[in-house]
Amino acid sequence: MRIETGSSLQTFMTCPKLYKYKYIDRLSSPMYSSALAYGTFVHAFVERYNGDRPNEPGRAFERELKEYGEQNEQRIRIDFDQAEKVVNLWRTYWDGFTGSTMSTPALKFLETEQEWAFDIRPGHTKAGKRDGYVELLKYGKRALYELKTSGDTSRDAYKHKLSLDKQINANVIALHREGKECEAVLYDIIWKPGLRLKTGRKTMPDETQAELSDRIVEEYKANPDQYFERLLVYRSKRDLDEYAFDTAAQFDTLDRVNERGLWYRNTGACEHFGRLCSFFSTCLDNNTEDKEQFMPRAKKHPELSHDFQLKLTEEHHE
């Protein structure tokens, strides 16, 4: 029995050795990632406004603080506050938000952050969590909802990748298995301004992270058309069939590697977005002692709740 998510399969296809570190050894990097935390906080605030979890932002903040320690508290709080301000601007832009009312809502959220699972075939289960399921009020149709935050400088290339997003195909299949209408995906993209810390200035001190955050928020206010984008992308039966074929093949490959214990390295993936993999030095020297710098993860799949993963495991053992 094997249960995998879009993130775990993508990690395996990127580098099997990285998959072993993250999903078998269950190690996570001790380095705080502002970009990842910011995306988490944005999702948490959207979930608070459109779902049934009003305390989700606070819980997300506490999780980051617990995992990355008080030494990062100031940076975590800056990212948290920036996310709240940007999401408020996003609401105002799309839905005419004023105070506590939505004056011209385009969407009705039917659910948010719903966990799902289905069998690709017996013994191989794909699981995940969808951002939302919405009704498009103008058209009277229902669609999968996905929120993305991206700093990709090639926006056209990023949007082309979304049209082939495999995890979206899994979400659509899950909705169909639940008997729910869905032929399209509504993407809300919050683009990140390409602003950087101002340092080395002759007449002024270096800019602080808090000052940069304020400048980013002001940039959103001045140019919302540039940073808030909404796309409607359709999925065909052929898309879903090809996804099922690809995923079954990925499960097969993962099974073979796992059975032989041959967790090979893909050195082409050591550097990503200008940064070395967190496990680079450990992997380079095959240094088992180096693993002590990483923190253990309680769950194999961090994006899924403990209770949901336990339920899936119990169902497969029945």
Image: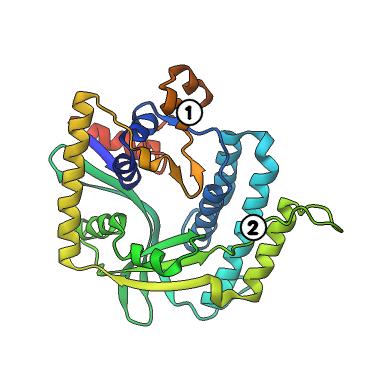
Visible residue check, residue 304:
no
Left-right relation of 147 to 7: right
Left-right relation of 131 to 102: left
Q: Is residue 215 above or below residue 288?
A: below
Residue at image point 25% right, 26% down? 262
- Percent x, y for residue 221? 65, 72
Circle 1 sits on which residue?
281
- Percent x, y for residue 298? 43, 29
Report, in whole angstroms, how far the alpha carbon at label 1 lies from the one at label 2: 33 Å
| Residue 264 marker | none
The residue most toward the left is 122
Left-right relation of 210 to 49: right
Element type at marker 2? helix
Residue at image point 44% right, 73% down? 230
| The image quarter in which residue 194 lies | bottom right
Visible residue check, residue 111:
yes
| The image quarter in which residue 286 lies | top left
- Percent x, y for residue 184? 29, 70
* Amino acid on which disc 2 is placed: Gln
Circle 2 sits on which residue?
82
Front-most of residues 258 and 51 = 258
